[in-house]
Every structure is written in C-alpha cells, then in structure tokens.
Image (spheres, rainbow, N blue to C red):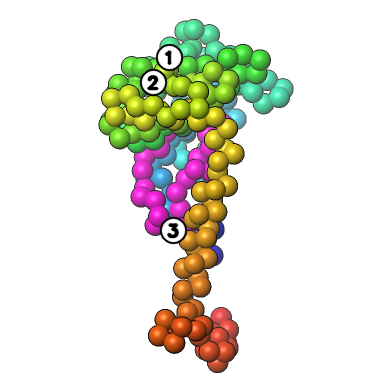
Amino acid sequence: MMTTAAARFSRRKCSSSARVSRVCRRLRPPGGWRESHAYDTRPVVEEQVKSLGAQFLKIDVGETGQTKDGYAKALTGEQIQKQRDAMKKVCGDSDVVITAAQVFGRRAPILVTAEMLNAMKPGSVVVDLAIETGGNVEGAQFDKVTDRNGVKIVGIANLPGRVPMHASQVYSANLTSLVEEFWDKQNKTSFSSSTMKLSRAAW
C-alpha cells in the first residue's frame, strides 16, 4: 500500500539545486515529477540524483568539490556567473524550482536571480530551503510567501518541520480509501467474514 495519496497531485516539471536528491525524494508527488532536473556543484551527487530517476544537470564551472563535512565548497565569482547563465534556461522551463544550497560558515549563495525569475512562467513556484541562512533566491523574504509577476517565492522557515501535517493528510486519505474498499454502504457494515476468508484464499 502506498503511504501517499495517489492521484492527489498532478505531475509537474521540477528543477532543483544543491542536495537535491533528498529534496526531490521528499517532495515528489506519488506519480513522480513529469520531468525532473537536479544540479549540484559536487560531482559525487550525480549518482544519487540518477538513482531517484531525475536527470543530472551538468554545468562546467571548473574545479569544484566538498568539505570533509560534506558541504559544497564556495565558488568563485566567475564560476557563479557560469552557473547562473546555464540555470536560467532550466528555470524558465520549470514549473517548480527548489533550492537548498548552503556553504558552511557563510551566507547561502544566490542561485536564482531576478533575471531567472523573470524568465519563469506565471504560476510557477520557487521554494527556498536555505532561507534561514540568507536564502538562494533573490528577493525571497524570511518566513513569507511572496509573488513576483505571478511566480510564487516560498521563503517559509523550517519548512521540513511542516511536512508531518501534510504527510498525515495524504496518509489518512489512503487509509480512508482502504476502509471504504471493504465497506458495505448498503448494509453499513464491513464485508462478511466469509468474504474476507475468500479474499485471503485469493491472496
């Protein structure tokens, strides 16, 4: 049995950056994203992204890597510009963009600029999971959802802490469907024990 409510969310095109394998895994709808791209400056993340069925976006910005604690190393100004140029088209084609890039001991880098936001379609959503350390999205406001030309920018703080409520909602919807499958609406009772025994024999 699925632990999320199937068909409750329509499929969309998603683009994510930094530690995206975990982000997309948590936020993907039951049917999966219609198309999912992920980017991280650390080459080691490519395998993790592909294992979840997403396409890894390769951007040649020169030498990159990670610290001994697993954080991405800070990029130079030239590397950041190359990254932004390549990501602009991807953001423009995406319905949802999720960012989660953080650099240990420093302010989170700006990954999604105002220029990129202007290239996105009205109705698109940008989720900034790094808002508590400064944010990855230009113009994102701490603990607020803002609108920029029809593009929603989600800067909610501690977003992972809000997941349990929605997880409970979709899980309860699944349990309700399971109970209704074995409920006799006419007699307002569950199926007879003989029916259940027959079902067990079929299994």
Element under disc 2: helix
Question: Mark 3 — residue?
Answer: 6
Q: Are marks 2 and 1 in contact (CB under 8 Å)?
A: yes
**Cα distance between the residues tagged 3 and 1:** 39 Å
Please give the name of the residue rendered at 50% of the width and 70% of the height, measured from the top-left corner: 178
Residue 152 shows up from this direction: yes
Q: Which residues fall within the magenta stretch?
A: 4-30
Q: Which mark is residue 86?
A: 2
User: In the figure, is residue 194 to the left or right of 177?
Assistant: right
Which of pointers 3 and 1 indicates the residue nearer the eye? Answer: 3
User: In the figure, is residue 88 to the left or right of 156?
Assistant: left
In the rendered structure, which disc, 3 or 1, sits on the residue that comes first in sequence? 3
Residue 171 at x, y = what percent? 53, 58
User: In the figure, is residue 107 to the left or right of 32?
Assistant: right
Q: Are marks 3 and 1 in contact (CB under 8 Å)?
A: no
Please give the name of the residue rendered at 39% of the width and 21% of the height, measured from the top-left corner: 86
**Screen quadrant of the C terminus:** bottom right
Please give the name of the residue rendered at 50% of the width and 40% of the height, measured from the top-left corner: 24
Q: Amino acid at mark 2?
A: Ala
Which of pointers 3 and 2 indicates the residue nearer the eye? Answer: 3
How many other residues sit within 10 Å of disc 3, few (<14), some (14-19) or many (≥20)?
some
Q: Which mark is residue 82?
A: 1
Q: Is 18 rendered above or below residue 110?
A: below
Element under disc 1: helix
Which residue is at the front of the view, 159 or 195? 159
Residue 114, picture quadrant: top left
Q: Amino acid at mark 3?
A: Ala
**Cα distance between the residues tagged 2 and 1:** 6 Å
Residue 85 at x, y = what percent? 38, 17
In the rendered structure, which disc, 3 or 2, sits on the residue that comes first in sequence? 3
Q: Is residue 74 magenta?
A: no
